[in-house]
């Protein structure tokens, strides 16, 4: 077998094979040449070789992509398993915080009712109103009937506060009238007391 060096007829430099079959390009003057006289078997063998090389290159590329995908999945799994305990702890902490801030159902309702009654009995109606207005529960926790109980209780307590306040004002006015009447009687009796026949 004899090796033949192929040179450019224009500049006499070595030719580089472009497709590896029968086309050549001069790297210096960029002339392109086609080689004649190769047997069809050689050309077919070179074409088959190029097709096989391309197929292998595609397979290598597909394997590289699959390897990268698996590496990414492994990294994601490692990242997930690394952060999973922290995420669970955060969810538990947030849940506990929300539960601690929320009223405690009927127990909390009873506490609000007792505190409101205590303020009403003490005559501190503004504090009683504040306590009664605390009877609000997040609507996403209770059912409609439970929300209705809470709302009705709050309305009833506010009504009781208004009635107790009206009664207290009425009693205060009556006490003031009574005090004025007694004061007037004492003034009248002291005015006529110096006369002996009045006594």
Image (cartoon, helix red, strand yellow):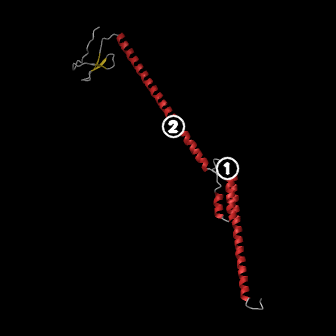
Q: Residue at x 59, y 45 (%)?
A: 96
Is residue 188 or residue 154 the one in the foreground?
188
Expressed as whole percent of the image width and height from the top left, the position of residue 105 reads: 67, 50
3D distance between C-alphas at marks 2 and 1: 35 Å
Is tag 2's residue or tag 1's residue first in the polypeptide sequence?
2
Q: Quadrant of residue 39?
A: top left
According to the picture, the residue beneath numbered tag 1 turns out to be: 105
Alpha-carbon neighbours of circle 1 within 10 Å: few (<14), some, or many (≥20)?
Answer: few
Where 166 falls versus 60 (above or below)? below
Expressed as whole percent of the image width and height from the top left, the position of residue 167 reads: 71, 68
**Are discs 2 and 1 less than 8 Å apart at CB?**
no
In the visual, does 97 lie left or right of 52?
A: right
Q: Residue at x 66, y 52 (%)?
A: 108
Figure quadrant of the C terminus: bottom right
According to the picture, the residue beneath numbered tag 2 turns out to be: 83
Q: Residue at x 46, y 29 (%)?
A: 71
């Amino acid at each position: 077998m004899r090796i033949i060096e192929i040179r450019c007829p224009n500049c006499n430099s070595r030719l580089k094979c472009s497709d590896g079959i029968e086309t050549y390009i001069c790297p210096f003057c960029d002339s392109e040449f086609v080689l004649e006289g190769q047997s069809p078997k050689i050309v077919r063998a070179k074409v088959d070789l190029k097709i096989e090389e391309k197929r292998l290159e595609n397979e290598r590329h597909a394997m590289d992509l699959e390897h990268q995908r698996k590496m990414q999945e492994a990294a994601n799994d490692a990242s997930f398993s690394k952060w999973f305990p922290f995420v669970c702890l955060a969810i538990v902490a947030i849940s506990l915080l929300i539960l601690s801030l929320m009223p405690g159902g009927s127990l909390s309702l009873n506490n609000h009712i007792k505190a409101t009654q205590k303020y009403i009995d003490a005559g501190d109606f503004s504090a009683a109103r504040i306590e009664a207005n605390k009877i609000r529960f997040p609507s996403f926790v209770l059912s409609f009937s439970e929300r209705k109980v809470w709302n009705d209780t709050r309305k009833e307590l506010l009504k009781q506060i208004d009635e107790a306040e009206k009664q207290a004002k009425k009693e205060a006015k009556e006490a003031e009238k009574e005090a004025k009447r007694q004061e007037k009687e004492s003034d009248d009796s002291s005015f006529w007391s110096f006369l002996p026949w009045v006594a």
